[in-house]
Each structure stands twice: as structure tokens, then as C-alpha cells.
Image: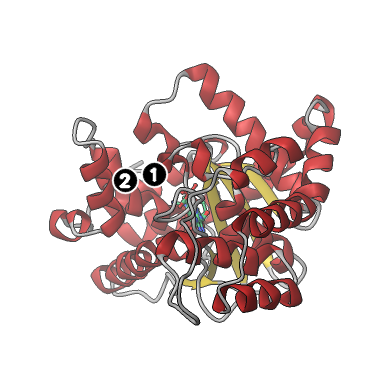
Amino acid sequence: MKETVVSGIRSTGKLHLGNYYGALSNFVKMQDAYNCFFFIADLHSLTTHPTPGDLSRTVREVVVEYLAAGINPETSTIYVQSDVPEVAELYLYLNMNAYLGELERATAFKDKVRANPDNVNAGLLTYPVLMASDILLHHGTKVPVGKDQEQHLEMTRTFGNRFNRLYNVDYFQEAMAFSYSDKLVKIPGLDGNGKMGKSNGDASCVYLSDTPEVIRKKVMRAVSDAGPTEMNQPKPEAIQNLFDLMKVVSTADTLAHFEDLYNNCAIRYGDFKKQLAEDMVLATEPVRSRINDITNDDEYLKKVVRLGAEKASESARKTIREVREIIGIKKLF
Ligand code: TYM
């Protein structure tokens, strides 16, 4: 039997290169070897209170981008999280065994509290419990995610193991974060610090759907500095970030060429950025053109989403039946 893969991306807007190289490109690579469930995490996105219109628009965008990136809806299960309400039931059960201290210690939670002190809602606190529910609902054991999700996977294992211990069963297996590279990926943004992410602003992100002109503009404006003044000088963060991005989208030869120029104090950032932008345009081109092909194909999208909901619901209903039985929830008569 094939091992089960579960992963999702929040529907907070168009997907960027961080989502792509951290998660989506691995979804595509994994789909033939594993039994895959890939969902659009619309329930997770509610922590930031999107308007109803924005919510449904972004869910649709992410479905389109999953398909455009090459996920095959016949072999993988692509579904919208809220189409499978069983996840909310499992979330409720797991919440009974998730403790305030451990939830408050989660790095992502602490970051969000710092960034938005006026919106520290309970959904944000229990975000990792909902994530664990997504994974355990289908008995996922491999979870393709970026580096920022590593701790949440650890928490998923904690909640699953705790459930097993509490009810003296061997029901949930341990899920591991997965990437094809030797470690989980962190794609930096264009703004000189931190990772590429929507919360760092549009200028830090290159979206899969950005036109070549927009990509060129964003990259040319990326934060850099006056250039190296000593041979083999260590790179400041903003420059290292651009090299890290080049490592992802360019050939090894191109990267080596610019490393060499940097180390010899001969680099011209204009040329470096131009090359980086062109390689980003090239890397995103196949996805971008497929986005344009399918974005208005209502019939196709409807078929995909309905099929996904059916397949995911079947797996979810079985788990909920079994979990209720383990917990002792049954109809009295
Ligand atoms: P989200 O939407 O924040 O991120 C989706 C995926 O993209 C990865 N990612 C990155 N990877 C590398 N570098 C970056 N700059 C970068 N930015 C984003 C994230 O690591 C993630 O893999 N909570 C999850 C969504 C989710 C989920 C799940 C994932 C909900 N339930 C169950 C796996 C299993 C999240 O981070 O969404």
C-alpha cells in the first residue's frame, strides 16, 4: 500500500515562490509515488477575517494554481478543507488534549501575536490543532511543507501520540515533514530580511501569476547594497537572500558565475538582478500560462472540486467513525 501524503496551503491570496518551492512543487513530485491529499486551507485563513467575497475568490485561485502547477486531480485528491466538515469534529476532539502552555509556545503563534496584537483569537492559538486534524483525518505520514511548518508537524505528532496514550490505542501514526532536498526549504523575500510571505508585503513576494514585467520590476527593486569591497567578503543578509533565490531558479553555472564575480568584487547588481529576474520569469512561465488557460474554466474546476470533496469525505468519514468509537461516543439508542 502506498504511504499517505497530506498537505495544504491557506487561501489567503495568490501563491508565491515560497509556497511553490516550499510546498507545491513537492506536491507535484510526490503524486505518483504516494496516496496524496492536497487541500485548500480555507478554514485556517479565517483567523484573519477575510470578507466572504475575498474568501471564495482566493479559494478558487488556489485550486487553479494547484492544477496549473501540475497536480493531477485523477490521481491526487484536491479538495477544499471546508467541503469536509469532519475536520472540524476531529479538531474539537483534539482540542481537549491540547494544552494552553504548549500552544502559546509555538513560534508561529508568538510571531502572529507580535505582528497583530489586536487579533489574538482562539483560532490562532489552536491553529496547530486544526493542522493536526487535517493530517490525522487521512492518516497522513508524509507532509510536504516549508521550514516554517516544522514545529507544527512536531505538535501534530504530540497530539496524535497523546490521543493514542489516552485511549490506549495504536491508532494515529506519526507524520513527518517532507522535502526532496536534504532539509526543509525557506525561500527568502525580496525585502532584505526574513522569508517570502504575504505578511511581509507584496514587494517581498514573487507570485506564480505575476507577469514577466511585474517580476522584473520587483526584482530590480529588491534590497541590495553598494557591493563588496573586499575579496571573499561574507554576504550581508539582503545579498545572501538574492543568491539563495538564484540557487532555486537558476542553473548551477549561473550561480557559480555570480558567486565568482561577488568574491572578486566585480559584481554589478544590475546585471545580477536582471539575470535573476529572467530566470524567475522562465521558472514560473509554465505555471503562469496554465493559470491563464484554466482560470475561467468553471466546468472543469467544478468537476475537480466535487470529485476531491467526494474522495476526501470518504476517507474522513471512516476516521471519524473510528475515532468516535475509540472515544466512546455512540448513540444511546
Ligand atoms: P501557508 O499558506 O502559510 O503556507 C503554505 C506552504 O507554503 C510554505 N511556505 C514557504 N516555504 C518556504 N519558504 C517560504 N518563504 C514559504 N512561505 C510559505 C509553508 O511552509 C507551507 O508548507 N499551516 C499551513 C497550511 C496547512 C497545512 C495543514 C500544511 C494547514 N493544514 C496540514 C500541511 C498539513 C501553512 O503554513 O500555510
- Residue type at mark 1? Glu
Judge by depth and name the residue closer to the eye, 114 or 8: 114
Residue under the point 63% across and 42% down? 207
Q: Is residue 28 above or below residue 264?
A: above
Residue 2 visible in rendering: no
| Left or right: 232 as drawn, with respect to 80 | left
Whether label 1 lies within 8 Å of ligand 1 gets the answer: no
Alpha carbon distance from label 2 to label 1: 5 Å
Where's the C terminus, which quadrant? top left
Residue under the point 48% across and 69% down? 228
Are the residues tagged 2 and 1 within 8 Å (C-beta)? Answer: yes
Give residue 318's position: percent from left, percent from top. Answer: 54, 55
Colouring used for the render? secondary structure
Q: Is residue 31 above or below residue 262?
A: above
Q: Can you identify the residue that label 2 sits on?
A: 92
Q: Can you identify the residue that label 1 sits on?
A: 89
Judge by depth and name the residue closer to the eye, 82 or 287: 287
Residue 302 visible in rendering: yes
Give residue 41's position: percent from left, percent from top. Answer: 51, 42
Q: Which quadrant would residue 36 be assigned to in this image?
A: bottom right
| Left or right: 259 as drawn, with respect to 324 | right
Give residue 315's position: percent from left, percent from top. Answer: 59, 54
Q: Which quadrant would residue 51 be assigned to in this image?
A: top left
